[in-house]
Amino acid sequence: MNQAKRIKPIQWLLVSGGLLLLLLVFFPRSPRPPDLEISQLIQLAEAGQIAKIQVRGDKLEVMSIDGETFRSRKESSVSVLELLDQRGIATGTGGIQVDVKEEGRSFFSTLFSIMPLVIFGGLIFYMIRRSRSGLSQVMGIGKSQARLVTDKPSVTFQDVAGAEEAKQELVEIVEFLREPEKFARLGAKVPRGVLLTGAPGTGKTLIGRAVAGEAGVPFFSVSGSEFVEMFVGVGASRVRDLFARAKEAAPAIVFIDEIDAVGRHRGAGIGGGNDEREQTLNQILVEMDGFDERTNVIVIAATNRPDVLDPALLRPGRFDRRVVLDLPDIKGREAILAVHLRGKPILDDVDIPTLARQTHGFSGADLANLVNEAAILAARQEKSATSLEDLEEAIDRVIAGPARRSRHVSEKEREIVAYHEAGHALVAASLPNADTVHKVTIVPRGSAGGYTRLLPDEDRGLWSKGQFEAMMAVMMGGQVAEEFALGDITTGASNDLKNASEVARKMVTEYGMSEELGPRSFDTGQDMVFLGKELAQGHNYSDAIAEKIDAEIGSLLHKAQQTAKKALETNKARLTLLANKLLSDETIEGPELQQLLNGAVERAPMSP
Ligand code: ADP
Ligand code: MG
Ligand code: ZN
């Protein structure tokens, strides 16, 4: 980009030079006419009126004996002396004094004569320059664009909250680089590669940058996608260059973010175009093998798709250490919220543990986004600090998109939505295995007409079959309530049905929760990782089993619908009460909601 800036003065020179040339051509100098014709000069000289003649080329400066000066011209071929001689006029002492001076060149004539040279010179210079820079651009392509992070980045481990194990692991690795002797003495080998894995937004890039802040050794950072460029073979040479630079700077850390961009399974996928990536990957493998015992370079890579990585990357001697960054648990969310709320103006009513409890399943990035959204909401209302209300609204936004209060909703539609949401809430309240209802609203949000937010009582890593069944029943609750109250069903339940079907499918094919099919995992090819591979393989069971799976999913969903129906039947009066409350208040939460729902649990202790 600065190429353009550099040629600017040259272009300017060319243009102004051209203009000047035009001026000179169209307005040539018109020399002033001489005061004296040469013939007159000779007459005067013969008359003895002339004292002195100064010669400059063809120009003559004539001084009369009275002290007057005139200008005159002669032919270029003849000399003044000869001319005077021929007439018998004396020159030198006693006669006319003739002075021959060097011919002075005028500024314009000089410019005129060298101008073409300057212009052509400039043009040639410009052309060479251009072709050179083009050349050097091509030559520079194989150079890696890894940034050497030299000055301490602003991010340190302090900014990474919650991921204690990951931090611990990385601290050890940094120690390896700082004091290699300590480990060598005991015969421990420096680890070659560390693979950071985890869902998007769990802080992989963040922790990678934090290592640079903590390392105290040169840190080369590059993103996998930067290797993949339009020129074939470039990726590989970039890798070579990157590792050469790192080895020179050893002890050093190389950080490859998003390594799945180059490190995918070789030989997978449809069609060509993978050669480039494969070569790049091969080069990474070659470079990592090329480290000898004493090379103090550690490669840290990050990916959210460890499952698609080529197995060769993961074998010992390469990325043999794995650091997993999980979605944060409740304590982790508290810590992350604290980090992001630190130093921001917040009201006293903001209670971090409560927020952490409401944000189950949020990643670090979601939480950072949540805090930011809340601050934006507060700023829009000209508030001086963020309140709990802003933060809760932001949670809804992150989950379901911004509220759309302006959308016009007909009375009929509001009623449908109110019954639908009340149905979800009541089914949840009446099933012991379902999560607690936290908030019910009919304010349209994102693409949903309203929504019911459930809150798990604790963080859970494991789900029981009973919890899944309750969850599906809650999902069915919306449509069942519509049918009960209005005698008809609407399209509003499409998302609920989709989610419920997905849960049922996973129960049958992944979790072995179907009595009919037993404890077996079926690869249905739903999570298509590489289109090519999956297409080639198809599913790993017979068509008869496929039919059984279908039937089983159907029966699970049907059972869930029956559960929802029973629950709402028992609580029919309460359903109307809740729906009417929603129609008047739009949103119900907190103690009021608990009061409305508590009775439901007592009256109908359902077991699915
Ligand atoms: P990833 O690379 O895993 O997809 P990032 O590292 O880019 O995720 O995280 C995105 C943002 O989320 C970070 O810039 C940071 O603001 C926030 N974040 C994620 N995890 C954490 C954490 N453990 N502590 C503090 N902030 C976090
Ligand atoms: Mg990242
Ligand atoms: Zn619904």
Image: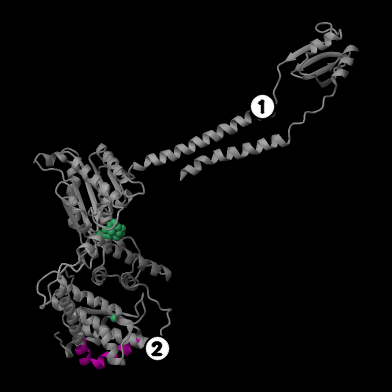
Distance from label 2 to label 1 (Cα)? 91 Å
Q: Amino acid at mark 1?
A: Thr
At which x and y percent is residue 138? 40, 41
Q: Position of residue 48 (x, y in %)?
A: 89, 11
Tell me the crowding category of disc 2: few under 14, some 14 to 19, or many 20 or more residues within 10 angstroms, Cα based: few
Residue extent of the magenta highlight: 564-584
Identified at 66% across, 27% down, the residue is 110
Q: Secondary structure at mark 2?
A: helix
**Can residue 434 be seen from the camera position used here?**
no
Q: Residue furthest top?
A: 93
The label on residue 555 is none
- Check if residue 125 falls in the magenta segment: no
Tell me which numbered mark, 2 or 1, is placed earlier along the sequence. Answer: 1
Residue ID for mark 1: 110
Can you say whether 363 is above or below 322 in the image? below
Residue 40 % position (x, y): 88, 19
Q: Is residue 529 above or below residue 280?
A: below
Residue count near mark 1 (Cα–Cα under 10 Å), binned few <14, some 14–19, many ≥20: few
Q: Residue at x 83, y 17 (%)?
A: 63
Where residue 322 sits, quadrant-wise, is: bottom left
- Specify the amino acid type for callout 2: Glu
Determine whether the residue tagged by mark 1 lies in a helix, strand or loop. helix
Q: Residue 411: which disc?
A: 2
In the displayed structure image, the side of residue 193 where residue 7 appears, left or right = right
The scheme the figure's colours follow is one colour
Which residue lies most toward the right here?
47
Which marked residue is nearer to the observer: mark 2 or mark 1? 1
